[in-house]
Image: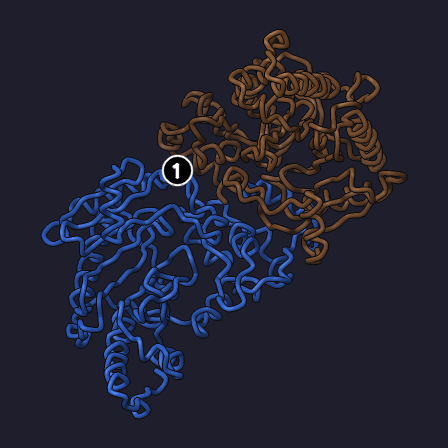
Chain colours: A brown, B blue
Amino acid sequence: MPFGNSHNQLKMKNTCEQEYPDLSKHNNHMAKVITPVLYEKLRSKQTPSGFTLDDVIQTGIDNPGHPFIMTVGCVAGDEETYEVFKDLLDPIIQDRHGGYKPTDKHKTDLNPSNLKGGDDLDSNYVLSSRVRTGRSIRGFCLPPHCSRGERRAVEKLSVEALGVLSGDLKGKYYALKNMTDAKQQQLIDDHFLFDKPVSPLLLASGMARDWPDARGIWHNDTKTFLVWVNEEDHLRVISMQKGGNMKEVFTRFCTGLTKIEDLFKNKGHSFMWNEHLGYVLTCPSNLGTGLRAGVHVKLPNLSKYRQFEEILKRLRLQKRGTGGVDTAAVGGIFDISNADRLGFSEVELVQMVVDGVRLMIEMEKRLEKSQSIDDLMPAQK
Amino acid sequence: MPFGNTHNNFKLNFSVDDEYPDLTKHNNHMAKLLTKEIYAKLRDKQTPTGYTLDDVIQTGVDNPGHPFIMTVGCVAGDEESYEVFKDLLDPVISDRHGGYKATDKHKTDLNFENLKGGDDLDPNYVLSSRVRTGRSIKGYALPPHNTRGERRAVERLSVEALNSLDGEFKGKYYPLKSMTDAEQEQLINDHFLFDKPVSPLLLAAGMARDWPDGRGIWHNENKTFLVWVNEEDHLRVIAMQKGGNMKEVFKRFCVGLQRIEEIFKKHNHGFMWNEHLGFILTCPSNLGTGLRGGVHVKLPKLSTHAKFEEILTRLRLQKRGTGGVDTASVGGVFDISNADRIGSSEVDQVQCVVDGVKLMVEMEKKLEKGESIDSMIPAQK
């Protein structure tokens, strides 16, 4: 792969014009923001670990995007990427995260007692509840850029930290590379298993290198708390259960995350975080909280209502199919989650989901009885 | 992508054990030959453009291989790769190319007059004839490693060179990025079009970056001589036509190639070549002549004969389906071509095809009449 220090120096012999990518058919945040002037300014730079501008943007060049879906088109290779390439990444962050400015500060709040309600979403409608986030371990490069040695070190640290958890968080690690067929089937049935990325967005940024080396899944005995190691981020932490008790899910999420963070700190490794960007993750779309809290909810009537999209927008929510991002809804069941990541705290985002879903269920019940929902229409949050 | 100079130095902070890839489930030439000792010896090296050991082997790490097909599992990023990493690549070359030694010399012979016969393969059996090779332009990094600027320079030089051809070689260049639908359809129907690589072998080596920038197809008006620019190699040169006149195809191939080479030399950009490895190409499997001369031939009876594989081995030929490598044959029609690339000349290899196919067509005719072919089984060439 060509993007390290030496070859970047050689590239400097060509003019900016000779090297500037052709983005005429592209539609992603990177392509919208980058200009020859910006490219010229940043192309000689590199982070301390050698991540360069072309490393940041390669995925966006190789994946022009889709007329309807706005992908980010760039990734970070290490914590310093967001600083060294801020002239490109700040505008992208602003564009992606609703006008978030380079001078803004991000609030972190992982205190579950600050969440109001959320323990009583109607389980006739809400089939399951889930909260996920990501964490990066300071001192190691991120998945697009890390070496095998770094990746294995992240795995080792993570397994040691997770191995200390007790009580309802007590669990076990299953490395992908020596997983038995039986275990693999079990994890698929539990909806836990992550597979080698096939998305060209991820492949083009180098995240699938050396698969499945140092990748694995940890989960607790009760299968309500799970951690993915070395997939798109160093760690993805997920709390989930059937039914509508989002409060319980969020409480376990916060408790577990905080314990894991303490364990890492005891080993001399904190999570990447700063007061401007919050938690630092591989994809700029996941900065801030990195949090996606959602439910699988039955909304067959509301989803066909002409103002469904508008309602979601005003509630600051987004819909996905039940297979996750880029899948279609099946049987009127939608995955509804917070649209924001940055500029709001974890509690605030989960509150939006809880309040928004409660409202949408009320609307669904009205529509079932062919009643109007005009008076229920929310203002823009 | 992480493999340049700076990050390679970072990697050296980890031990060989930490960084050495897990190749336990692998079956490719690289995995067979890369020991920890060789890894330790080569891991701090880089070519002048910054290509490192991990760059060479990444495709083989990411693609464990297949129990029946032996892939190479490594690629060159520039001409110097074969020198800097000879401790790995010489054994791989020897293993792949029938024991070719590090001290052996390779013969180049593009004098078509040295080919005996080949103008009379029975067109009732031989449907088409084709010869292809690759060429790399000195001074530029190869497709796994080159920058957009380099790739575009290769394209520009190539188009200038090709556009100066005349007579039966007069033709036109079609860049992939501005191809009309009509042109694309035509090229598909002519069996000329190459598409963005989907093979994980190529993708993992970084050859599809920036697609379709700098890529295109040039062909003459008669559609018998065609050049692919910036696919798996800088240039792939192909001569083809219907029927069994391999001599004519090979003549056009040699004449066209030599004219192109002269033009490149005038611009001070010769082809990468040395007396040990012959023509230098991206994949070690294509060193030497880089030549695959083949026919599509109907052998429904011979192909089901007990000794078909043995006959091919002895004739130094290989079979493929008519869709190319890794496809199945349809209707008893096979793609039969030379198995060797290095250690014998272009004329030698095409001679094997001509003589071998002539013999196999005779065998097919005997089998059609229910006669034995035992007396015709050849000795090992």
Please state, as top left, top right, bottom left or bottom right, where the C terminus of chain A lies in the image.
Answer: top right
Chain containing mark 1: B
Left or right for A261, reference A26: right
The answer to whether one can see residue A331 in this image is yes
Identify the residue at horizontal 49%, vertical 66% (top origin).
Answer: B70
Q: Is residue A34 left or right of residue A120?
A: left
Q: Pointer 1: residues within 10 angstroms few (<14), some, or many (20+)?
A: many
* In the foreground, B300 or B162: B300
- Residue farthest to the front? A369
Q: Is residue A345 visible?
A: no
Which of the pair B43/B182 is nearer the observer?
A: B182
| Image coordinates for residue B253, horizontal then vertical, percent | 21, 61
Percent position of residue A95, x then y: 53, 18
Q: Quadrant of residue A312?
A: top right
> Residue A102's x, y, as percent?
60, 14
> Residue A31's spot in the image, x, y percent?
44, 25
Front in this rendered view, residue B73 or A217: A217
**Viewed as shown, does residue B107 lie left or right of A55?**
left
Badge 1 marks a residue whose secondary structure is helix
Residue ID at (71%, 16%): A355
Task: Depth check: give the residue in front, A95 or B164.
Answer: A95
Q: Which residue is mark 1?
A: B148
Residue B249, above or below A119 = below
| Amino acid bearing label 1 | Arg
Left or right of residue A289, residue B345 in this image:
left
